[in-house]
Image (tube, helix red, strand yellow):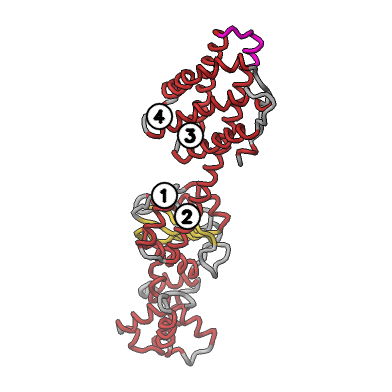
Protein backbone atom coordinates (compact mmCIF):
# COMPACT_ATOMS: atom_id res chain seq x y z
CA UNK A 1 0.00 0.00 0.00
CA UNK A 2 1.43 3.36 -0.98
CA UNK A 3 1.24 6.37 1.35
CA UNK A 4 -0.92 8.30 -1.11
CA UNK A 5 -3.60 5.60 -0.80
CA UNK A 6 -4.00 5.92 2.96
CA UNK A 7 -7.62 6.57 3.91
CA UNK A 8 -8.05 10.15 5.12
CA UNK A 9 -9.88 11.09 8.33
CA UNK A 10 -13.14 13.04 8.22
CA UNK A 11 -11.52 16.37 9.18
CA UNK A 12 -9.06 17.40 6.45
CA UNK A 13 -6.18 19.35 8.00
CA UNK A 14 -5.19 20.69 4.59
CA UNK A 15 -8.39 22.64 4.12
CA UNK A 16 -8.39 24.45 7.47
CA UNK A 17 -6.51 27.60 8.52
CA UNK A 18 -5.92 29.25 11.91
CA UNK A 19 -5.28 32.95 12.30
CA UNK A 20 -1.74 34.32 12.83
CA UNK A 21 -2.42 35.34 16.44
CA UNK A 22 -3.11 31.67 17.21
CA UNK A 23 -0.13 30.27 15.29
CA UNK A 24 2.66 32.66 16.38
CA UNK A 25 2.73 31.63 20.08
CA UNK A 26 2.61 27.98 19.04
CA UNK A 27 5.53 28.38 16.67
CA UNK A 28 7.54 30.13 19.36
CA UNK A 29 6.93 27.31 21.81
CA UNK A 30 7.43 24.49 19.30
CA UNK A 31 11.02 23.52 20.33
CA UNK A 32 9.94 23.02 23.93
CA UNK A 33 6.86 21.00 22.93
CA UNK A 34 9.01 18.82 20.64
CA UNK A 35 11.47 18.10 23.45
CA UNK A 36 8.63 17.21 25.82
CA UNK A 37 7.13 14.88 23.21
CA UNK A 38 10.43 13.09 22.57
CA UNK A 39 11.11 12.70 26.29
CA UNK A 40 7.65 11.20 26.85
CA UNK A 41 8.09 8.68 24.02
CA UNK A 42 11.45 7.59 25.44
CA UNK A 43 9.97 7.28 28.92
CA UNK A 44 6.69 5.54 28.07
CA UNK A 45 7.58 3.35 25.08
CA UNK A 46 10.51 1.08 26.06
CA UNK A 47 11.13 -0.02 22.47
CA UNK A 48 12.29 3.52 21.65
CA UNK A 49 14.56 4.14 24.62
CA UNK A 50 17.64 2.63 22.99
CA UNK A 51 17.11 4.04 19.46
CA UNK A 52 16.85 7.57 20.87
CA UNK A 53 20.16 7.16 22.67
CA UNK A 54 22.21 6.88 19.47
CA UNK A 55 22.60 8.52 16.09
CA UNK A 56 19.20 7.21 15.06
CA UNK A 57 17.68 9.14 17.94
CA UNK A 58 18.75 12.45 16.39
CA UNK A 59 17.02 11.48 13.15
CA UNK A 60 13.81 10.52 14.95
CA UNK A 61 13.92 13.72 17.02
CA UNK A 62 14.26 15.76 13.84
CA UNK A 63 11.33 13.84 12.36
CA UNK A 64 9.16 14.71 15.40
CA UNK A 65 10.08 18.40 15.19
CA UNK A 66 9.53 18.40 11.42
CA UNK A 67 6.11 16.76 11.79
CA UNK A 68 4.95 19.36 14.30
CA UNK A 69 6.44 22.16 12.22
CA UNK A 70 4.70 20.89 9.10
CA UNK A 71 1.42 20.87 10.97
CA UNK A 72 1.79 24.54 11.95
CA UNK A 73 2.73 25.40 8.38
CA UNK A 74 -0.37 23.65 7.08
CA UNK A 75 -2.76 25.55 9.32
CA UNK A 76 -1.07 28.96 9.09
CA UNK A 77 -1.22 29.87 5.40
CA UNK A 78 -4.72 30.76 4.26
CA UNK A 79 -5.20 30.30 0.53
CA UNK A 80 -1.94 28.38 0.02
CA UNK A 81 -1.84 25.02 -1.70
CA UNK A 82 -1.62 22.51 1.17
CA UNK A 83 -0.84 19.53 -1.04
CA UNK A 84 2.96 19.67 -1.12
CA UNK A 85 3.73 19.99 2.61
CA UNK A 86 1.07 17.45 3.54
CA UNK A 87 2.28 15.00 0.90
CA UNK A 88 5.82 15.39 2.19
CA UNK A 89 4.65 14.69 5.74
CA UNK A 90 2.68 11.62 4.61
CA UNK A 91 5.65 10.29 2.64
CA UNK A 92 7.93 10.84 5.63
CA UNK A 93 5.51 8.99 7.92
CA UNK A 94 5.22 6.16 5.39
CA UNK A 95 9.02 5.92 5.20
CA UNK A 96 9.17 5.93 9.01
CA UNK A 97 6.82 2.94 9.12
CA UNK A 98 8.94 1.01 6.64
CA UNK A 99 12.10 1.84 8.53
CA UNK A 100 10.62 0.72 11.83
CA UNK A 101 9.63 -2.61 10.27
CA UNK A 102 13.16 -3.05 8.91
CA UNK A 103 14.59 -2.30 12.35
CA UNK A 104 12.43 -5.06 13.86
CA UNK A 105 10.20 -2.83 15.98
CA UNK A 106 6.60 -3.89 16.14
CA UNK A 107 3.57 -2.02 14.90
CA UNK A 108 2.31 -1.89 18.50
CA UNK A 109 5.42 0.04 19.55
CA UNK A 110 5.05 2.44 16.64
CA UNK A 111 1.38 3.15 17.38
CA UNK A 112 2.16 3.54 21.08
CA UNK A 113 4.74 6.18 20.17
CA UNK A 114 2.13 8.00 18.10
CA UNK A 115 -0.40 7.87 20.94
CA UNK A 116 2.06 9.20 23.49
CA UNK A 117 3.34 11.83 21.05
CA UNK A 118 -0.16 13.06 20.20
CA UNK A 119 -1.16 13.33 23.85
CA UNK A 120 1.95 15.16 25.01
CA UNK A 121 2.15 17.43 21.96
CA UNK A 122 -1.47 18.41 22.37
CA UNK A 123 -1.01 19.19 26.07
CA UNK A 124 1.96 21.41 25.30
CA UNK A 125 0.33 23.22 22.41
CA UNK A 126 -2.96 23.62 24.29
CA UNK A 127 -1.13 25.11 27.29
CA UNK A 128 0.47 27.69 24.99
CA UNK A 129 -2.91 28.57 23.47
CA UNK A 130 -4.53 28.93 26.89
CA UNK A 131 -1.67 31.12 28.06
CA UNK A 132 -2.10 33.28 24.96
CA UNK A 133 -5.76 33.77 25.88
CA UNK A 134 -7.34 31.90 22.98
CA UNK A 135 -11.07 31.22 23.38
CA UNK A 136 -12.30 27.71 24.15
CA UNK A 137 -13.90 27.29 20.70
CA UNK A 138 -10.61 28.01 18.96
CA UNK A 139 -8.75 25.62 21.22
CA UNK A 140 -11.38 22.94 20.55
CA UNK A 141 -10.99 23.40 16.78
CA UNK A 142 -7.25 23.28 17.20
CA UNK A 143 -7.47 20.01 19.16
CA UNK A 144 -9.49 18.41 16.41
CA UNK A 145 -6.93 19.48 13.83
CA UNK A 146 -4.00 18.15 15.88
CA UNK A 147 -5.52 14.72 16.32
CA UNK A 148 -6.71 14.54 12.70
CA UNK A 149 -3.18 15.32 11.58
CA UNK A 150 -1.66 12.67 13.87
CA UNK A 151 -4.22 10.16 12.59
CA UNK A 152 -3.09 10.80 9.02
CA UNK A 153 0.55 10.36 9.90
CA UNK A 154 -0.04 7.20 11.93
CA UNK A 155 -2.17 5.71 9.13
CA UNK A 156 0.66 6.36 6.66
CA UNK A 157 3.19 4.78 9.03
CA UNK A 158 0.96 1.73 9.51
CA UNK A 159 0.77 1.36 5.72
CA UNK A 160 4.55 1.65 5.42
CA UNK A 161 5.13 -0.87 8.19
CA UNK A 162 2.73 -3.37 6.60
CA UNK A 163 4.20 -2.90 3.13
CA UNK A 164 7.74 -3.45 4.40
CA UNK A 165 6.76 -6.63 6.22
CA UNK A 166 4.97 -7.90 3.12
CA UNK A 167 7.92 -7.06 0.88
CA UNK A 168 10.40 -8.58 3.33
CA UNK A 169 8.28 -11.71 3.58
CA UNK A 170 8.13 -12.08 -0.19
CA UNK A 171 11.88 -11.60 -0.50
CA UNK A 172 12.61 -14.12 2.25
CA UNK A 173 10.20 -16.69 0.79
CA UNK A 174 11.91 -16.31 -2.57
CA UNK A 175 15.33 -16.79 -1.00
CA UNK A 176 14.16 -19.86 0.92
CA UNK A 177 12.83 -21.22 -2.37
CA UNK A 178 16.23 -20.63 -3.97
CA UNK A 179 17.89 -22.43 -1.07
CA UNK A 180 15.57 -25.42 -1.47
CA UNK A 181 16.25 -25.52 -5.21
CA UNK A 182 20.00 -25.43 -4.55
CA UNK A 183 19.69 -28.34 -2.09
CA UNK A 184 17.78 -30.39 -4.66
CA UNK A 185 20.38 -29.54 -7.29
CA UNK A 186 23.19 -30.67 -4.99
CA UNK A 187 25.05 -27.36 -5.07
CA UNK A 188 28.41 -27.13 -3.26
CA UNK A 189 28.46 -26.37 0.47
CA UNK A 190 29.81 -22.82 0.05
CA UNK A 191 26.94 -21.96 -2.30
CA UNK A 192 24.40 -23.37 0.15
CA UNK A 193 25.97 -21.48 3.05
CA UNK A 194 25.70 -18.20 1.14
CA UNK A 195 22.05 -18.80 0.22
CA UNK A 196 21.22 -19.71 3.83
CA UNK A 197 22.73 -16.43 5.04
CA UNK A 198 20.81 -14.42 2.44
CA UNK A 199 17.58 -16.12 3.50
CA UNK A 200 18.36 -15.57 7.22
CA UNK A 201 17.92 -19.32 7.65
CA UNK A 202 19.78 -20.97 10.54
CA UNK A 203 21.20 -24.28 9.29
CA UNK A 204 20.47 -27.38 11.42
CA UNK A 205 22.86 -30.28 11.90
CA UNK A 206 20.88 -32.43 9.48
CA UNK A 207 17.97 -32.42 7.06
CA UNK A 208 15.58 -35.23 6.20
CA UNK A 209 13.70 -35.24 2.92
CA UNK A 210 9.98 -35.99 2.86
CA UNK A 211 8.34 -36.81 -0.46
CA UNK A 212 4.58 -36.37 -0.38
CA UNK A 213 1.59 -35.06 -2.36
CA UNK A 214 1.35 -31.28 -2.56
CA UNK A 215 -2.04 -31.19 -0.82
CA UNK A 216 -0.56 -33.13 2.11
CA UNK A 217 2.45 -30.80 2.27
CA UNK A 218 0.16 -27.83 2.84
CA UNK A 219 -1.39 -29.66 5.77
CA UNK A 220 1.69 -31.03 7.54
CA UNK A 221 4.20 -28.21 7.12
CA UNK A 222 2.66 -26.28 10.02
CA UNK A 223 3.30 -29.30 12.26
CA UNK A 224 7.03 -29.33 11.53
CA UNK A 225 10.07 -27.26 12.48
CA UNK A 226 9.60 -23.65 11.25
CA UNK A 227 12.89 -23.97 9.35
CA UNK A 228 11.40 -26.69 7.13
CA UNK A 229 12.04 -25.94 3.45
CA UNK A 230 9.50 -26.75 0.75
CA UNK A 231 9.84 -27.21 -2.99
CA UNK A 232 6.96 -28.30 -5.22
CA UNK A 233 7.56 -30.42 -8.32
CA UNK A 234 11.08 -31.17 -7.11
CA UNK A 235 11.22 -34.42 -9.11
CA UNK A 236 10.39 -33.69 -12.78
CA UNK A 237 8.94 -37.11 -13.58
CA UNK A 238 6.87 -37.24 -10.38
CA UNK A 239 4.25 -34.53 -10.93
CA UNK A 240 2.12 -33.52 -7.97
CA UNK A 241 4.76 -34.41 -5.41
CA UNK A 242 6.44 -31.94 -3.08
CA UNK A 243 9.67 -32.30 -1.13
CA UNK A 244 10.02 -30.99 2.42
CA UNK A 245 13.46 -30.75 4.01
CA UNK A 246 12.88 -31.16 7.77
CA UNK A 247 15.60 -30.18 10.25
CA UNK A 248 17.03 -32.84 12.59
CA UNK A 249 14.16 -35.40 12.74
CA UNK A 250 16.49 -38.22 13.77
CA UNK A 251 16.92 -40.26 16.91
CA UNK A 252 13.95 -40.26 19.23
CA UNK A 253 12.11 -37.66 17.16
CA UNK A 254 11.88 -39.85 14.06
CA UNK A 255 9.05 -42.03 15.45
CA UNK A 256 7.27 -38.80 16.36
CA UNK A 257 7.68 -37.63 12.78
CA UNK A 258 6.21 -40.92 11.53
CA UNK A 259 3.15 -40.43 13.74
CA UNK A 260 2.67 -36.83 12.59
CA UNK A 261 2.73 -37.89 8.96
CA UNK A 262 0.38 -40.85 9.21
CA UNK A 263 -2.44 -40.59 6.70
CA UNK A 264 -0.56 -38.54 4.10
CA UNK A 265 1.24 -41.00 1.76
CA UNK A 266 4.72 -39.84 2.75
CA UNK A 267 8.14 -41.32 2.03
CA UNK A 268 10.74 -40.33 4.66
CA UNK A 269 14.37 -40.23 3.58
CA UNK A 270 17.38 -40.67 5.84
CA UNK A 271 18.83 -37.85 7.94
CA UNK A 272 21.87 -36.31 6.27
CA UNK A 273 24.19 -33.35 7.02
CA UNK A 274 22.18 -30.37 5.81
CA UNK A 275 24.52 -29.57 2.92
CA UNK A 276 24.04 -33.16 1.69
CA UNK A 277 20.23 -33.14 1.80
CA UNK A 278 20.12 -34.10 -1.88
CA UNK A 279 21.17 -37.64 -0.94
CA UNK A 280 18.20 -37.90 1.42
CA UNK A 281 15.86 -36.89 -1.39
CA UNK A 282 17.51 -39.37 -3.77
CA UNK A 283 16.86 -42.18 -1.31
CA UNK A 284 13.23 -41.12 -0.84
CA UNK A 285 12.72 -41.00 -4.61
CA UNK A 286 14.18 -44.48 -5.08
CA UNK A 287 12.00 -46.00 -2.38
CA UNK A 288 8.95 -44.19 -3.77
CA UNK A 289 9.61 -45.79 -7.16
CA UNK A 290 10.03 -49.22 -5.56
CA UNK A 291 7.04 -48.98 -3.21
CA UNK A 292 4.74 -45.97 -3.72
CA UNK A 293 2.78 -45.33 -0.50
CA UNK A 294 -0.99 -45.45 -0.64
CA UNK A 295 -3.90 -45.47 1.74
CA UNK A 296 -2.26 -42.77 3.85
CA UNK A 297 0.80 -44.90 4.60
CA UNK A 298 4.12 -43.56 5.84
CA UNK A 299 7.06 -45.29 4.16
CA UNK A 300 10.33 -45.00 6.05
CA UNK A 301 13.31 -45.61 3.79
CA UNK A 302 15.14 -47.14 6.77
CA UNK A 303 12.79 -50.13 6.38
CA UNK A 304 13.71 -50.61 2.71
CA UNK A 305 17.51 -50.55 2.77
CA UNK A 306 17.86 -54.08 1.42
CA UNK A 307 15.62 -53.28 -1.54
CA UNK A 308 17.56 -50.09 -2.21
CA UNK A 309 20.86 -51.97 -2.22
CA UNK A 310 19.59 -54.85 -4.33
CA UNK A 311 18.11 -52.54 -6.97
CA UNK A 312 21.03 -50.10 -7.06
CA UNK A 313 22.12 -51.46 -10.46
CA UNK A 314 18.99 -52.69 -12.28
CA UNK A 315 20.85 -54.09 -15.29
CA UNK A 316 23.25 -56.04 -13.08
CA UNK A 317 20.32 -57.40 -11.09
CA UNK A 318 18.59 -58.46 -14.30
CA UNK A 319 21.74 -60.24 -15.48
CA UNK A 320 22.14 -61.98 -12.13
CA UNK A 321 18.51 -63.05 -12.13
CA UNK A 322 18.72 -64.44 -15.65
CA UNK A 323 21.89 -66.38 -14.82
CA UNK A 324 20.56 -67.71 -11.51
CA UNK A 325 17.32 -68.91 -13.11
CA UNK A 326 18.98 -70.61 -16.10
CA UNK A 327 18.17 -74.11 -14.73
CA UNK A 328 14.46 -73.21 -15.02
CA UNK A 329 14.69 -72.30 -18.70
CA UNK A 330 12.94 -75.49 -19.81
CA UNK A 331 9.92 -75.05 -17.54
CA UNK A 332 6.59 -73.78 -18.84
CA UNK A 333 5.43 -70.23 -17.96
CA UNK A 334 3.00 -70.94 -15.12
CA UNK A 335 5.02 -73.80 -13.71
CA UNK A 336 8.20 -71.75 -13.87
CA UNK A 337 6.54 -68.87 -12.03
CA UNK A 338 5.38 -71.18 -9.22
CA UNK A 339 8.83 -72.66 -8.88
CA UNK A 340 10.41 -69.20 -8.71
CA UNK A 341 8.08 -67.99 -5.95
CA UNK A 342 8.60 -71.21 -4.02
CA UNK A 343 12.39 -70.99 -4.35
CA UNK A 344 12.35 -67.39 -3.17
CA UNK A 345 10.22 -68.21 -0.11
CA UNK A 346 12.34 -71.30 0.66
CA UNK A 347 15.50 -69.18 0.66
CA UNK A 348 14.03 -66.44 2.84
CA UNK A 349 12.53 -68.90 5.33
CA UNK A 350 15.70 -71.02 5.46
CA UNK A 351 13.90 -74.11 4.17
CA UNK A 352 11.14 -74.17 6.81
CA UNK A 353 8.39 -75.91 4.84
CA UNK A 354 5.49 -74.86 7.09
CA UNK A 355 6.46 -71.18 6.86
CA UNK A 356 6.83 -71.41 3.07
CA UNK A 357 3.39 -73.00 2.77
CA UNK A 358 1.82 -70.34 4.98
CA UNK A 359 3.34 -67.52 2.93
CA UNK A 360 2.27 -69.03 -0.39
CA UNK A 361 -1.16 -70.25 0.88
CA UNK A 362 -0.49 -73.80 -0.31
CA UNK A 363 -0.32 -77.18 1.39
CA UNK A 364 3.08 -78.20 2.80
CA UNK A 365 2.95 -81.23 0.51
CA UNK A 366 2.81 -78.87 -2.46
CA UNK A 367 5.94 -77.14 -1.18
CA UNK A 368 7.61 -80.54 -0.85
CA UNK A 369 6.70 -81.45 -4.41
CA UNK A 370 7.96 -78.18 -5.83
CA UNK A 371 11.22 -78.28 -3.88
CA UNK A 372 11.81 -81.81 -5.13
CA UNK A 373 11.50 -80.50 -8.68
CA UNK A 374 13.87 -77.57 -7.90
CA UNK A 375 16.47 -80.02 -6.52
CA UNK A 376 16.22 -82.00 -9.74
CA UNK A 377 16.87 -78.85 -11.76
CA UNK A 378 19.58 -77.28 -9.57
CA UNK A 379 21.20 -80.37 -8.12
CA UNK A 380 23.97 -79.67 -5.59
CA UNK A 381 23.89 -75.96 -6.39
CA UNK A 382 21.15 -75.44 -3.78
CA UNK A 383 23.73 -76.47 -1.17
CA UNK A 384 26.51 -74.29 -2.59
CA UNK A 385 26.85 -71.06 -0.49
CA UNK A 386 27.80 -69.00 -3.54
CA UNK A 387 24.75 -70.17 -5.47
CA UNK A 388 22.50 -69.64 -2.43
CA UNK A 389 23.84 -66.07 -2.13
CA UNK A 390 23.30 -65.39 -5.83
CA UNK A 391 19.78 -66.81 -5.76
CA UNK A 392 18.90 -64.86 -2.60
CA UNK A 393 19.99 -61.58 -4.17
CA UNK A 394 18.41 -62.36 -7.53
CA UNK A 395 15.05 -63.24 -5.96
CA UNK A 396 15.11 -60.77 -3.04
CA UNK A 397 12.66 -58.40 -4.73
CA UNK A 398 9.54 -60.06 -6.18
CA UNK A 399 9.16 -59.49 -9.91
CA UNK A 400 12.48 -57.61 -10.00
239 relative to 192 in the view: left or right: right
- Alpha carbon distance from label 3 to label 4: 16 Å
Residue 292 versus residue 186: which sits nearer the camera?
Answer: 186
Q: Are marks 1 and 4 in contact (CB under 8 Å)?
A: no
Q: Secondary structure at mark 1?
A: loop
CA–CA distance between discs 1 and 3?
A: 19 Å
Residue 64 image point, x, y percent: 49, 27
- How far apart marks 1 and 4 lie (CA) works out to 27 Å
Q: Secondary structure at mark 2?
A: helix
Query: x%, y% of residue 364?
Result: 45, 74
Q: Is residue 157 left or right of residue 47?
A: right
First-in-chain label (3 vs 4):
4
Residue 175 disc label: 2
Q: Which residue is mark 4?
A: 52
Q: CA distance from mark 2 to mark 4?
A: 33 Å
Mark 1 or 4: in front is: 4
Residue wearing tag 1: 200
Q: Residues within 10 Å of mark 4 (few under 14, many from 20)?
A: some
> Tag 4 or tag 1, which sits nearer the N-term?
4
Left or right of 222 on screen, residue 15: right
Contact flag, marks 1 and 2 (Cβ < 8 Å): yes
Q: State how many labels appear.
A: 4
**Which mark sits nearer the N-terminus, 1 or 3?**
3
Q: Is 371 above or below relative to 98?
A: below
Residue at the spot 48% in from the left edge and 36% down from the top edge: 100
Calculate the distance from the C-alpha at mark 1 to the C-alpha at mark 2: 9 Å
Disc 1 and disc 3 in contact, CB within 8 angstroms: no
Residue in the picture at 64% in, 8% down: 136
Amino acid sequence: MRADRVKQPVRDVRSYRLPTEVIDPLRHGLPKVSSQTIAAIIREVPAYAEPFSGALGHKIARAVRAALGTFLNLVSRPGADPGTPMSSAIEAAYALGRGEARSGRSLDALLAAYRVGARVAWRGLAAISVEAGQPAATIADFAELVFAYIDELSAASVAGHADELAASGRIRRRRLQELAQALVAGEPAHVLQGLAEQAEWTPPQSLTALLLPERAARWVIDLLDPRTLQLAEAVPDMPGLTVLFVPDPQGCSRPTLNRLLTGHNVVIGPARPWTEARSSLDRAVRVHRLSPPDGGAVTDTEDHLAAVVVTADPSALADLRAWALTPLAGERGTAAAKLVETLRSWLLHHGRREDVAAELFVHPQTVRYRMARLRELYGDRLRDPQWVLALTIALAIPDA
